[in-house]
Each structure stands twice: as C-alpha cells, then as structure tokens.
Amino acid sequence: MLIDVTVKVPEERVGDFYEFVGRWLSEEQPADEVLDASAGPRSWTNSKDDLGPARSVWAKFSPRAKAVFSLLMDRPGHQVSGRDLASTLDIPNGTSGVAGVLGWPGRHCAAVNRVALWRWEYRPEEDSTYYWIEPEVADLFKKVRN
C-alpha cells in the first residue's frame, strides 16, 4: 500500500530530493546506501574544488553577513561572543540578531552541499554563544573576499 506524504524541501534541493526518493523506491540502491551517498554536506577545505562553491555562497551573503565573516576570518580560530559581534558590527537585537544574520548563509552553504563555514559553541554558564572560523576555511574565504 502506498500513501501520500507531504514534505517541505528547499526549492534549490527539489531535484536532489526526487533523485533520492526515486533511487530508494526503485531499489536501485538499498536504502542504507542511498542514505550514505546523501549522508550530508561536506566540510569546507582550502582546495581548488571548494573555491567555486565558496565564490557562489560569498556572492549571496548580505553586507552584514560579510561583515561578520570578515571579522571572524581576520581572526581565524579565535572565538568571538555573539554579544561582541553584535556590539562591534552594530547588529540590532544583540545575540539574536547575530543568529538571524547567520540563517541565510547556512542555507546558501547547504545549497552547495557544504556545512556552514563557521563554528559555534553555546556556553550555558555565560549564557553566551561563541563563533569562529577554522584557519583553513578562513584562508579559502579570504581568497574569495579579496
């Protein structure tokens, strides 16, 4: 018996979704292999292969997102609190505003099958979130920014 299922999928990923479901339903590949093949986005590297996707996502970032990432890229590996980012870059609504600025960049990275270019850690004892960019990723995006 087949049933109808409704799922929301980002517009730019519809083709990937249909391919995944089609391969799974046709049993072209066992479900676990299909899941392994689409196990998730890849990490960024400072390689030629990532230069094109990095250019693509950087071009889509808002000016405020570019400011956040530029500050983090210029201090690779250094953890900066959301409060400091908001204060330094005059982002409205403090830490919530910083999280909001990062929403679309996360989607743009996912659209090219990559993880977010930044890392973060919530510290409950401070009730604060810290953000940073790993040195290798900072080097890649500096090439794109410049």
Image: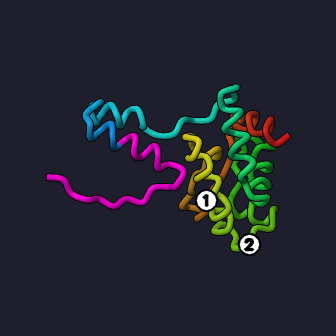
Q: Position of residue 71 (x, y in %)?
A: 79, 50
Identify the element where label 1 is drawn.
helix
Residue 133 sits above or below residue 123 on the image: above
Q: Spot the residue most to the right.
A: 146
Lower sequence index among marks 2 and 1:
2
Which stretch did the figure color magenta? Answer: 1-20
The quarter in which the C terminus is drawn is top right
Q: Which residue is mark 2?
A: 92
Q: Position of residue 138 (x, y in %)?
A: 74, 38
Q: Is residue 63 magenta?
A: no
Q: Residue at x 61, y 62 (%)?
A: 128
Q: Is residue 15 magenta?
A: yes
Q: Residue at x 18, y 53 (%)?
A: 2
Q: Nearer the viewer, mark 2 or mark 1?
A: 1
Residue type indicated by callout 2: Pro
Viewer-closest of 21 and 37? 21
Q: Position of residue 94 (x, y in %)?
A: 70, 70
Q: Are marks 2 and 1 in contact (CB under 8 Å)?
A: no
Residue 60 sits above or below residue 46 on the image: below
Q: Residue at x 58, y 53 (%)?
A: 107
Q: Which residue is mark 1?
A: 103
Alpha carbon distance from label 2 to label 1 = 15 Å
Q: On the picture, is 2 further left or further right than 22? A: left
Identify the element where label 2 is drawn.
loop
Q: Residue at x 42, y 37 (%)?
A: 38
Viewer-closest of 82 and 8? 8
Residue type indicated by callout 1: Gly
Q: Position of residue 3 (x, y in %)?
A: 21, 57
Q: On the picture, is 68 further left or further right than 10? A: right
Q: Quadrant of residue 34?
A: top left
